[in-house]
Amino acid sequence: MEIQGTIKVIEETKTYGSNGFRKREMVVTTDEQYPQHLLVEFVQDKTNLLDKFQVGQQVKVSIDLRGREWVSPQGDTKYFNSIQGWRIENLQEATPGDDIPPVPPADAFEPADNLKEEDYDDLPF
């Protein structure tokens, strides 16, 4: 599955337990009539994927939906869902021509003074 939207929040990586489990969360706001603020978690080596992104960027996130069951000591059963990201892409890619330098203004050039009348060629159209 995939979700698209704007990055609203990127948290720092957090480490849990003695085994070094790592998790990093981000919030993506969808671009819909009724925008949703979706918490997406990246775990273990996927936490590094968020290093090159920042708040405000338009992204597409590949996700898996995760669900788990928990039984309390009193015997009550609860269910929890999470959205786990495994790939993220920037939707604001550079457009062709971004690497072309701007054209200098016309007044940045000196007029040519070495033109001769015989060099003038009138085109027939």
Image (cartoon, grey):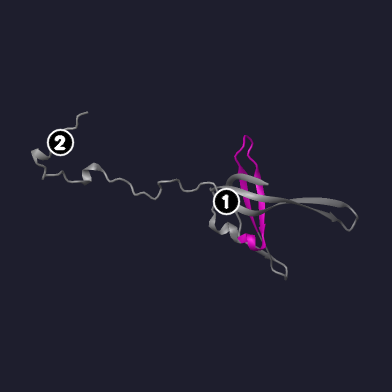
Query: Of helix, strand and loop, which one carries label 2?
Result: loop
Q: Which amino acid does label 1 sit on?
A: Glu
Residue under circle 1?
89
Residue under circle 2?
121
Quick one: 78 or 93, which is closer to the camera?
Answer: 93
For residue 78, side relative to residue 123 (left or right):
right
Q: Residue at the spot x=83%, y=51% of the render?
A: 78
Give the position of the C terminus as an image quadrant.
Answer: top left
Query: Of helix, strand and loop, which one carries label 1?
Result: strand
Q: Which label is found at residue 62?
A: none
For residue 91, side relative to residue 95 (left or right):
right
Q: Residues within 10 Å of mark 2 (few under 14, many from 20)?
A: few
Q: How crowded is mark 1: few (under 14 residues within 10 Å), some or many (20 or more)?
A: some
Q: Using the numbered discs, state the Cα–Cα distance from disc 2 to disc 1 in whole angstroms.
A: 55 Å
Q: Nearer the viewer, mark 2 or mark 1?
A: 2
Q: Which amino acid does label 2 sit on?
A: Asp
Question: What stretch of residues is rendered in magenta?
Answer: 24-47
Q: Residue at the spot x=22%, y=46% of the render?
A: 108
